[in-house]
Every structure is written in C-alpha cells, then in structure tokens.
Amino acid sequence: MIQIKKIIIAYETTQDLVKDSGLSINAKWSLFKLRKKLYPHYEFHVTESRNLFLSYKTEVDGNTVTFESVDLANEYQKKQDEIDNFEIDEDIEKIKLKLSDIPGITIPQMEQLEEFVEFSPE
C-alpha cells in the first residue's frame, strides 16, 4: 500500500527531472514509463481535491482562500487530509536508473523517488 501523496510528490519530481537536458535517453524513457504508471493516481488526486474544494463556498483572492467559517475550513482540511492519505493498493514496479544517466538529480529528489526507482551507481 502506498499513500497517494507519495505518488503525487514522485510524479511532480519526474516533471522536474524531465526538464533536464543532461538526461540520457535511457533515463528519459524510464521516467516516461514511470510517469505513465503514476499518472492515473495523480489525476485521481487532482480531481478529488478539486471537487472537494469546489464543494465548499469559498472566496478566492489571488493566493488567499477564505472560508465562510473556521469550522468549515477545518472540515475542509480534514477531508483534504483524507484524500492526501488515501492508500493505493497497487504494486507499482520500480524502474531502474543509473545515477550517471541523471547527473543533475539531487538527494531530496532521490528520496522522493525511492519507492518507485531503484538507483544504481553504474
């Protein structure tokens, strides 16, 4: 079982990594395959989060969201936490990547991908 928020973080990390022109073709292909595996779960999370947000009467001003009451804001946050902590009962097979194929990867990015990528030094 994998928490959907880990999938979201991994998907967003792959988005950042594929922008790196220093990636080998093997790394690009592997990340592409991983993104395809993660995307349905990413889309589910985005849709559920959007639907939840739209179900609450809010006022949006730039990056500020105002709820009708503190109780509604707390209720919303509780429900959003449930969506974020939803567990996927699917075994997502790890991809294999050589670190030399992704020279710009950072340690935090490796940590964000470790459940989905098997890194090797060569």
Image (cartoon, helix red, strand yellow):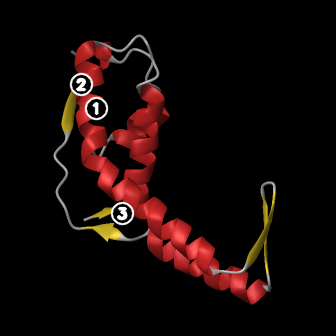
Is any atom of residue 121 visible in this view? no
90 left or right, relative to 114: left
Q: Position of residue 20 (x, y in %)?
A: 45, 18
The amino acid at mark 3 is Gln
- Mark 3 to mark 1: distance in Å? 21 Å
Tag shown at residue 16: none
Choose top left, top right, bottom left or bottom right for residue 79: bottom right
The amino acid at mark 2 is Trp
5 left or right, relative to 59: left
Choose top left, top right, bottom left or bottom right for residue 70: bottom right
Choose top left, top right, bottom left or bottom right for residue 40: bottom left
The amino acid at mark 1 is Phe
Up-down: is 47 above or below 122?
A: below
The residue wearing badge 3 is: 3
CB under 8 Å between discs 1 and 2? yes
The residue wearing badge 1 is: 32
In the image as oriented, which residue stretches furthest toward the right? Answer: 61
